[in-house]
C-alpha cells in the first residue's frame, strides 16, 4: 500500500506543505520566513507562528495543485507534532487535524527528527534498516542506529550546542549574518581548511559532540590576531571553522558505522546541506564501500515531504494518531508523541 498523504511541517521558520505517495513526493512547497527573522538575528517565535497562519492555506492549495490531487483522493494527513516552537507547531498540527477531521481521514502526528531520519527514503531505495544516520539541525545533533523503523538507538549526541547552532553562532561571531550555516558555507569557498587549527572536542568519546568550546576558541583567535593586525583572509578562517565542525561530525558518524557494521549511512537536518560535509561523507563512504543516502539539500533542510514519507510509512502499518493528541515541543526521538 502506498498511501497518498497531505503533509505539513511548521516546527520553526518554514511553512511547508507536501503531497507524498508512499516514498514519492508529488509536490513539496515551502514559504521561508528567513527575511522576517533576519533583522532580529534569530527566529522570533511569535512572528513565526503568525507567519505560518498567513501562509498555510494558500500553500496547501499550491501543494495539491502541483501534485494534481483533489483532497477527495487523499488517504491521510500528517503533520509535525514536535519538537519545535509550540506556537509554530500548533498552527500546522491544528490545520492538519482540522483538514483530516473534515474529510474523515486518518491523522498521523510525526516527530520532526524522525522526518529528517526518513527523508532519504524519498530518494534512495537502498535506504532500509539497519542504517546509521547523522541528524544535525539547528536544535539537534545525534548519531542514530536504526534497527527497524521506530527502533532507534541514539548512539551519541551533543553535550552542549547542536551543530547547526554552532554554525549559526560562529557565523555571528564572524559577522556573517543569519542564518549562519549557509553563510559560512559560502564564505568558506576557496578557503584553506587547514589554515587555522581549531580544536576538535571530545576525542575520547567516540560518538558524542561538543561545540561550545569551539566558539570560545574562534572568538579568542579573532581578537588576538586582529589586535596583532594579522587576521588571515576570511575564506581561510571560515573554511577552518567549518572543517573543525565537519571533522567531528564525519569522524564520529563513521565510528558508529564501523562499530555497528551498518552497510548504509544516511543523514538529515539542515547541516547536511553543507557542501564540505557532503563531500567528506562521500569520501568516507567510498573508502568503506558503504551506501551513502543523504538526500538533496532541499530535503535535508526543513520540508514537508519528509513528514509525508514518515506519515505514509506509519499509516501503512496502521499506526494513526488519536484526535486528542497534541503537539509536544520537547519530543525526543523514539519517545511516544505525548
Ligand atoms: O533542519 P533545519 O532546517 O531546521 C531545524 O530543524 O533546526 O536546520 C537548520 C540549521 C541551521 O542551524 C542552519 O544554519 C543549518 O541548519 N544549515 C547549514 C547549512 N544550511 C542550513 N549549516 C551548514 N551549512 C549549510 N549549508
Ligand atoms: Zn529540522
Image: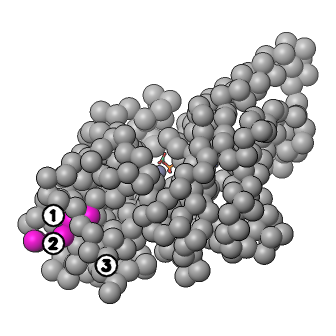
Q: Residue 316 carries which label?
A: 3
Residue 161 shown left or right of residue 32 in the figure: right
Q: Residue 301 carries which label?
A: none
Residue 180 shown left or right of residue 84 in the figure: right
- Mark 3 C-beta closer than 8 Å to ligand 2: no
Q: How far apart are marks 1 and 2 (CA)?
A: 8 Å
Instruction: Say whether marks 1 and 2 touch (CB < 8 Å).
Output: yes
- Mark 1 C-beta closer than 8 Å to ligand 2: no
How busy is the neighbourhood of tag 1: few (under 14 within 10 Å), some, or many (20 plus)?
some
Residue 107 shown left or right of residue 331 in the figure: left
Residue named by callout 2: 105
Residue in the picture at 15% in, 64% down: 99
Which secondary structure lies at badge 2?
Answer: loop
Residue in the picture at 24% in, 53% down: 93
Helix, strand or loop for the magenta stretch, by majority: loop
Can residue 336 be seen in the rendering of this structure?
yes
Which secondary structure lies at badge 3?
Answer: helix
Which coloring applies here?
Answer: one colour
Q: Is residue 180 above or below residue 75?
A: above
Residue named by callout 1: 99
Q: In this view, does 220 lie above or below 336?
A: above
- Highlighted range, magenta: 103-108
Residue in the picture at 22% in, 78% down: 75
Quarter of the picture holding the N terminus: bottom left
Amino acid at each position: 500500500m502506498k498511501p497518498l498523504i497531505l503533509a505539513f511541517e511548521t516546527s520553526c521558520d518554514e511553512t511547508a506543505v507536501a503531497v507524498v505517495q508512499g516514498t514519492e513526493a508529488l509536490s513539496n512547497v515551502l514559504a521561508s520566513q528567513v527575511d522576517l527573522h533576519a533583522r532580529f538575528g534569530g527566529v522570533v517565535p511569535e512572528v513565526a507562528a503568525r507567519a505560518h497562519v498567513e501562509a498555510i492555506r494558500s500553500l496547501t492549495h499550491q501543494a495539491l495543485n502541483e501534485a494534481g490531487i483533489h483532497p477527495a483522493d487523499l488517504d491521510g494527513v500528517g503533520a509535525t507534532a514536535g519538537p519545535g516552537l509550540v506556537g509554530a507547531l500548533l498552527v500546522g498540527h491544528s490545520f492538519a487535524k482540522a483538514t483530516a477531521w473534515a474529510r474523515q481521514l486518518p491523522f498521523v502526528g510525526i516527530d520532526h527528527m524522525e522526518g529528517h531520519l526518513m527523508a532519504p527514503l524519498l530518494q534512495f531505495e537502498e535506504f532500509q534498516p539497519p542504517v546509521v544516520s547523522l541528524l544535525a539541525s539547528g536544535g539537534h545533533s545525534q548519531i542514530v542506529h536504526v534497527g527497524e523503523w521506530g527502533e532507534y538507538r541514539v548512539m551519541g549526541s551533543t553535550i552542549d550546542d547542536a551543530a547547526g547552532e554552532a554554525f549559526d553562532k560562529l557565523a555571528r561571531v564572524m559577522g556573517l549574518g543569519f542564518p549562519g550555516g549557509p553563510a559560512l558555507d559560502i564564505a568558506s569557498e576557496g578557503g584553506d581548511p587547514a589554515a587555522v587549527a581549531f580544536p576538535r572536542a571530545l576525542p575520547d568519546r567516540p560518538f558524542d559532540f561538543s561545540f561550545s568550546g569551539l566558539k570560545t576558541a574562534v572568538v579568542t583567535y579573532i581578537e588576538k590576531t586582529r589586535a596583532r593586525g594579522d587576521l588571515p583572509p576570511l575564506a581561510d578562517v571560515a573554511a577552518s571553522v567549518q572543517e573543525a565542525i565537519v571533522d567531528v561530525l564525519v569522524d564520529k558518524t563513521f565510528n558508529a558505522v564501523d562499530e555497528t557494521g551498518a552497510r548504509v549511512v544516511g543523514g538529515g537536518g539542515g547541516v547536511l546541506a553543507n557542501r564540505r560535509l557532503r563531500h567528506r561523507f562521500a569520501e568516507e563512504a567510498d573508502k568503506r564501500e558503504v551506501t551513502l543516502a543523504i538526500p538533496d539539500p532541499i530535503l535535508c533542510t526543513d520540508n514537508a515531504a519528509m513528514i509525508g514519507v514518515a506519515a505514509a510509512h506509519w499509516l501503512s502499518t496502521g499506526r494513526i494518531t488519536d484526535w486528542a493528541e497534541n503537539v509536544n515541543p520537547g519530543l525526543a526521538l523514539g519517545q511516544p508523541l505525548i
